[in-house]
Amino acid sequence: MSHIMSPTFPTVRLRRLRQHPVIRDLIRETELNLDDLVHAIFIKGDKGDKQPVLSMPGHYQIPLSKLDEEIEEIVNLGIKSIMIFGVPSTKDAYGSDSFDDQGIMQKAIRQIKKLAPDLLIISDICFCQYTDHGHCGFMDDHHGCIDLNNDKTLELLVKQSISHVQAGANMLAPSGMIDGAVITLRRALDEAGFEHIPLMGHTVKYSSAMYGPFRQATEGAPKYGDRSRYQMDPANGNEALREAAVDIMEGADILLIKPAHTYLDIIYRVKQTYPHIPLCAYHPSAEFSMIKAAAEKGWINEKRVVFEVLTSIKRAGADFIVNYYTKEVARWIINKE
């Protein structure tokens, strides 16, 4: 019986269990499923051809005339949820297209709901792609210092949110890290009779360099300055816990952390601190594009890397993941590649 007490015994036991693939599946601690993934898409214009996002291979700015084809493909692949981003034809200081009944998002949401009523639509709530300056809210000149007007931005976020829900959005994801956004939107939705609409706040959103390709896709890069005044410093970890506490107190139904792959420690810490609150992680555009670029060079096995990265995000504590690989993951699962 001495071998039972040997320090090497647990390793030997695991090797035995790993020899059969079915046993490996039985004891696997973390399982990545298609239902864990939310596919993100970009919508721009009424007609014309899909325009490729050069920094995000396989992704396009999709006009409304091609949207049915895209949604049919998504549904046929077994994908159940999407997050949508609109790219307006006109921009102004208020981001008016975002709360116009005939805005790009409102038309897209109605079109999707008509074609696929059971598809979950998560609507991005922000202003960066709708404003002529590219910031996430209304900007004021404070004695020569141009800065975000938080209170005015909250007023506009309410208009945007109500408009998107009236069009048919199932969930709202305020993404600008605007102070008081969750509680303001919760109250406004409740007063308007939309108590059933959940809020997924971008609770922990870092002022990250990982959003570059996304800004090309949405044409929403800031024209001046950056967003470090209202988004988090990548060097800070404890601040994430404080932000999570505030969003929970304000009524967030789901917490979101962005970026994901480069912030696994933050996902873990937030989930360990608030284990009963659903947690979403956003695998952003640059994390996607880096994998794509390496795969195109032939330096990595794309499928294996994608499954490893997404599984690591779930293992860290995410309940589900917004990402740009969902369609490819679905094809890999269907084709059993």
Image (tube, helix red, strand yellow):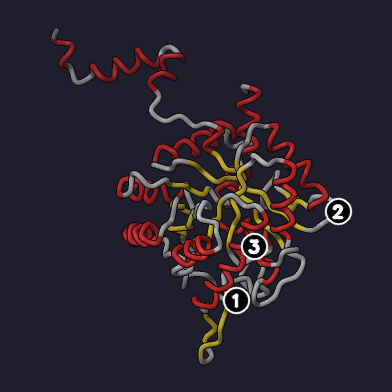
Residue under pointer 2:
48
Q: Residues within 10 Å of mark 3 (few under 14, many from 20)?
A: many
Q: Position of residue 5 (x, y in %)?
A: 15, 16
Q: Residues within 10 Å of mark 1 (few under 14, many from 20)?
A: few
Disc nearer the start of the sequence (1/2): 2
Disc nearer the start of the sequence (2/3): 2
Front residue (pair 129, 168): 168
Q: Are marks 1 and 2 in contact (CB under 8 Å)?
A: no
Q: Is residue 294 visible?
A: no
- Tell me how far mark 1 sits from mark 2, CA to CA: 31 Å
Q: Amino acid at mark 3?
A: Ser
Residue under pointer 3:
163
Q: Quadrant of residue 236?
A: bottom left
Q: Secondary structure at mark 2?
A: loop
Q: Position of residue 260 (x, y in %)?
A: 47, 49
Q: Position of residue 222 (x, y in %)?
A: 61, 71
Q: Nearer the viewer, mark 1 or mark 2?
A: 2
The image shows residue 16, relative to residue 125, as above or below, that is above
Front residue (pair 6, 194): 194
- Tell me how far mark 2 sits from mark 3, CA to CA: 26 Å
| Residue at (28% x, 20% y) in the render | 11
- Tell me how far mark 3 sits from mark 1, CA to CA: 29 Å
Q: Quadrant of residue 232?
A: bottom left
Residue under pointer 1:
224
Q: Position of residue 58 (x, y in %)?
A: 70, 43
| Residue at (44% x, 58% y) in the render | 203
Q: Nearer the viewer, mark 3 or mark 1?
A: 3
Q: Are marks 2 and 3 in contact (CB under 8 Å)?
A: no
Left or right of residue 299, residue 234 in this image: left
Disc nearer the start of the sequence (3/1): 3
Q: Amino acid at mark 1?
A: Tyr
